[in-house]
Amino acid sequence: SQQGEEDPQALSIQEGENATMNCSYKTSINNLQWYRQNSGRGLVHLILIRSNEREKHSGRLRVTLDTSKKSSSLLITASRAADTASYFCATDLAGSYIPTFGRGTSLIVHP
Amino acid sequence: SAVISQKPSRDICQRGTSLTIQCQVDSQVTMMFWYRQQPGQSLTLIATANQGSEATYESGFVIDKFPISRPNLTFSTLTVSNMSPEDSSIYLCSVVTSGSLNEQFFGPGTRLTVL
């Protein structure tokens, strides 16, 4: 099964609202990365958070990591229609640098 | 960061033919990977492209079907051989940067449709 699993699978919100997506994983990791993928396009790297970090910010993005619960969350504040995309988390197991991906969360932001 | 280009960006191919996808990176990177993303699915790692040696394939992927070359630290190719409609996917090249962050970056992908 997938190492990382995103939740929810789909999220639909209005522009201006916040969007929160969660990622859970099973084993110890080095890093956790979040990506965005617009329909049919390549992946855009958003944030990398290391296993010894708890929170990182980048613009309207906030990522948290709770290694005790083996989970991470991605918060997009003040969402825009342009944020409509699929969001994936990728984890690389401790001792490896090969990330594995979850199934993603499909986010739709209605203008 | 790393800038990655892939060629072709898309192609429509006939069953039984082969397609070679090229991946070019703007800097030398140690680790390069090839992923497949089937419609509506997440990414599945096909193999790690090793410079100067045979690629390391994941379970379910074999060299005869997906031969990979990596002649240097900035370039790799993936061939999808003897294609069938089930091979219709987006194929993505990816690199992991060296240094302390080990961030992974992706190319724009190659959308393959097999008729």
Image (cartoon, coloured by chain):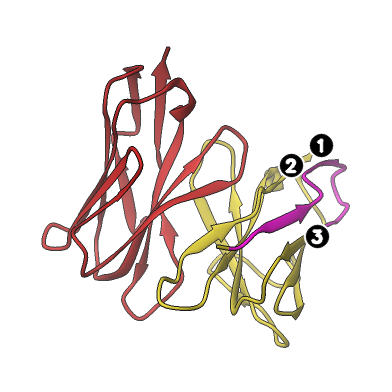
Chain colours: A red, B yellow
Residue B115 bears which disc, if any? 1
Furthest toward the bottom, the residue is B52
A4 in magenta: no
Q: Tell me whether circle 1 and circle 3 mark residues in contact (CB < 8 Å).
A: no
Residue B81 bears which disc, if any? 3
Name the kind of residue labelled 1 in the image.
Answer: Leu
Q: What is the distance, in whole Å, between disc 3 and disc 2 at their CAs?
A: 12 Å
**Visible residue check, residue B15:** yes
B14 in magenta: yes
* Above/below status of A92 relative to A17: below
Q: Is residue A88 left or right of residue B27?
A: left
Screen quadrant of the N terminus of chain A: bottom left
In this picture, which residue range is highlighted in magenta? B2-21
Query: Secondary structure under badge 3?
Result: loop
Q: Nearer the viewer, residue A48 or B87?
A: A48
Crowd band around label 1 with a 10 angstrom C-alpha radius: few (<14), some (14–19), many (20+): some
Name the kind of residue labelled 3 in the image.
Answer: Ser
